[in-house]
Amino acid sequence: MEVLNIKNIFFSYNEKLLLKNISLSLEEGEFLSIVGSSGCGKSTIIKLIAGIEKANSGTIECKSTGYMPQRDLLLPWRNILDNILLPMEINKKNLEEGKKKALEYLKKLKLDEYKNAFPSELSGGMKQRISFLRTLLTEGEILLLDEPFSALDMITKEQLQKWLLEILKKFKKSIIFITHDINEAIFLSDRILVCKNSPLDSFEEFKITPNIKNSPEESMELKNKILKIIKGEER
């Protein structure tokens, strides 16, 4: 069952056309990565889905969403629990009920020991875990993750990739994951869309099978194909 359907989206920023007649869909429970070079418009797509930006034309039909930006955006003067509750405060939701749910999620994700800590006491990887938890608490059926691990070192990034897949086994969510890291996309995804042309007007689609994930040779072959598309060497 589709949880997202985007049809014929056009989007301009400062009179520059970024997206030209873009369409895509997302299935329930699917992990979809969108990869492409910097500035190609991939992050703009999920900002449109989240309602942060508005398309010039076209339609977006989707279930509820939760959006996680690149930076954790944790407020340094609030402890972790209070940071998690901030979106609920802004949206004037029941804070007692929200606190109960936040503590439940912290425990489920084995992060409850950090509830009274402040952001300055946490590593970059731990901050991103907390940021992801805050996104989960929006209870969006579609999670929109905008290069959440891009600022992390390689070891921490790999740990969080494995952690994310483990967490997603506990929560039935559909994911759109923005990244410029092709290895990351192959490891995490069920399907990859590779951005083509400027302005962005189409995608090359690849379904990621267990064989591809488990075979270094097949993964490398796919990575090289994707790189050629991004560099414009395949038309």
Image: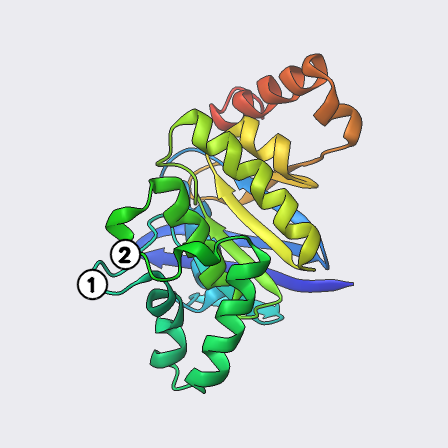
- Nearer-N-terminus badge (2/1): 1
Could you tell whether 134 is left or right of 108 in the image?
A: left
Residue 194 appears in the rendering: no
Question: Which residue corresponds to the image point at 44% horizontal and 55% vertical from the top-left?
Answer: 113
Question: Which residue corresponds to the image point at 57% horizontal and 22% vertical from the top-left?
Answer: 234
**Residue type (three-letter) at the residue carrying disc 1:** Trp
**SS category of the residue bearing label 1:** loop
Q: Residues within 10 Å of mark 2 (few under 14, many from 20)?
A: some
Relative image position of residue 23 (x, y in whole percent)? 60, 55
110 and 141: which is toward the camera: 110
Relative image position of residue 134 (x, y in whole percent)? 45, 63
Which residue is tagged 2? 118
Relative image position of residue 158 (x, y in whole percent)? 52, 30
Q: How crowded is mark 1: few (under 14 residues within 10 Å), some or many (20 or more)?
A: few
Asked if 208 appears above or below 24 in the picture, the reply is above
- State the colouring used for the structure image: rainbow
* Mark number displayed over residue 135: none
Which residue is tagged 1? 77
Question: Which residue corresponds to the image point at 44% horizontal and 65% vertical from the top-left?
Answer: 55
**SS category of the residue bearing label 2:** loop
Could you tell whether 118 is left or right of 224 in the image?
A: left
Could you tell whether 114 is left or right of 226 in the image?
A: left
**Residue type (three-letter) at the residue carrying disc 2:** Phe
216 and 117: which is toward the camera: 117
Asked if 132 appears above or below 141 in the picture, the reply is above
